[in-house]
Image (cartoon, grey):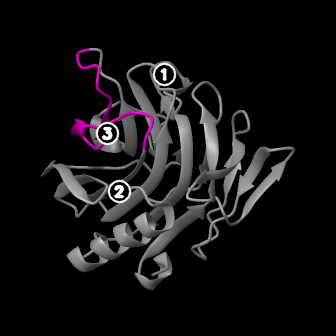
Amino acid sequence: FPSHDISGLKLWLKADAGVAESGGSVTSWADQSGQGKNASVIGANPTLTANAKNSLPAITFDNSSTLMSTSNIFNGASARTLLVVYFTDSLNGLSNTICGQVMTSGDDPYSKYFCIQARNDFLDSSPYLACYADDLSGNPYVDNEWNIAMADYDGTIARLYNNGALLSSGNKTLNTENDSFYIGGFYDIILGDFTEYFGGKIAEIIVYDSVLSNANRSNIFNYLNGRYAIY
C-alpha cells in the first residue's frame, strides 16, 4: 500500500529513497510525492543512520543545530494530514519540533502553527506528543522508542494520533502562515532564531491536502507499521 495510492499526496520523504549525503552527512532529501518539494539543509547537516529500524535507514537530528526545510504545504484553514515516523533520544528543553510549519513574522497566535512536537513538560516527567495547532496535546508516551504520529485538520476539528490510536481532538480555528515546512526544529519569532531542535531520528514524513477517511487512515498506519514494525 504505497502512500500515493491515496489522492492529495503533497509530500513524501522517506530515508530509504532520495537522500543525498556526503561522508554520512545529509545534504538533501528528495520528495517522492511528485510535487517537487525537496528538503534542503538550512542548519547543520543531519546524518544518515543505516539500519535504524527494521533494516531501514533514518535521518538523525542532534537537538542543537541540525535543520532542514522545504517550501510551504499548509495555508490558512485548509484541510491537511501530517504523518511522521520518529524516534526520540535526546529531548532538549520543553518542546522539540519534529516537523511542520511555523510562523516567522507578525504576531504569535497558536493558530498560525501546524507542527508535531515531542514535548517534555517540567510539570510531568513523561514526554508527550503534541500538535502545535492552537495547542492540542496528547497523552504521555515512552521516550527512546519508535512511534508513528499523525495530526489532521478538517477546517474545524484537529486530531492527534499515535501508533493508530486517537490521543486528542478539539475544535480549532487555524490560519497557518504561508511559510516553509521545517524538519527538525522550530522558528521562535520572539527570539528571532531557530530553536526547539529535535533530538532523534526521522524515517518517513507523509503529508496530504485532506483528512483521510477511516479506511485510508487505517491503511496508512498499517503500511507504515508494516515497514517499520513499531507496534
Picture coordinates of residue 47, whole percent (x, y):
72, 42
Q: Could you say which disc has been placed on residue 129 in the image?
A: 3
| Residue 184 visible in the snapshot | no
Check the picture and name the quadrant holding the C terminus.
Answer: bottom left
| Disc 1 residue crowd, few under 14, some 14–19, many 20+, Cα 10 Å | some
Q: Quadrant of residue 79?
A: bottom left
Q: CA distance from mark 3 to mark 1?
A: 14 Å
Q: Quadrant of residue 125?
A: top left
Toward the left, the furthest residue is 171
Q: Could you say which disc has been placed on residue 231 in the image?
A: 2
Asked if residue 193 is among those painted magenta in the image, a careful observer would answer: no
Picture coordinates of residue 228, whole percent (x, y):
49, 61
Task: Kindly identify which residue carries mark 1.
Answer: 92
Check the picture and name the quadrant holding the N terminus.
Answer: bottom left
Toward the right, the furthest residue is 23
Q: Is residue 188 above or below residue 49?
A: above
Chief secondary structure of the magenta span?
Answer: loop
**Amino acid type of disc 1?**
Asn
**Amino acid type of disc 2?**
Tyr
| Disc 3 residue crowd, few under 14, some 14–19, many 20+, Cα 10 Å | many
Towards the viewer: 197 or 113: 197
Q: Residue at x 48, y 47 (%)?
A: 86
- Give the magenta range: 123-145
Towards the viewer: 75 or 167: 167
**Amino acid type of disc 3?**
Leu
Say whether residue 132 is left or right of residue 184.
left
Asked if residue 126 is among those painted magenta in the image, a careful observer would answer: yes
Q: Earlier in the sequence, mark 3 or mark 1?
A: 1
Towards the viewer: 48 or 210: 48
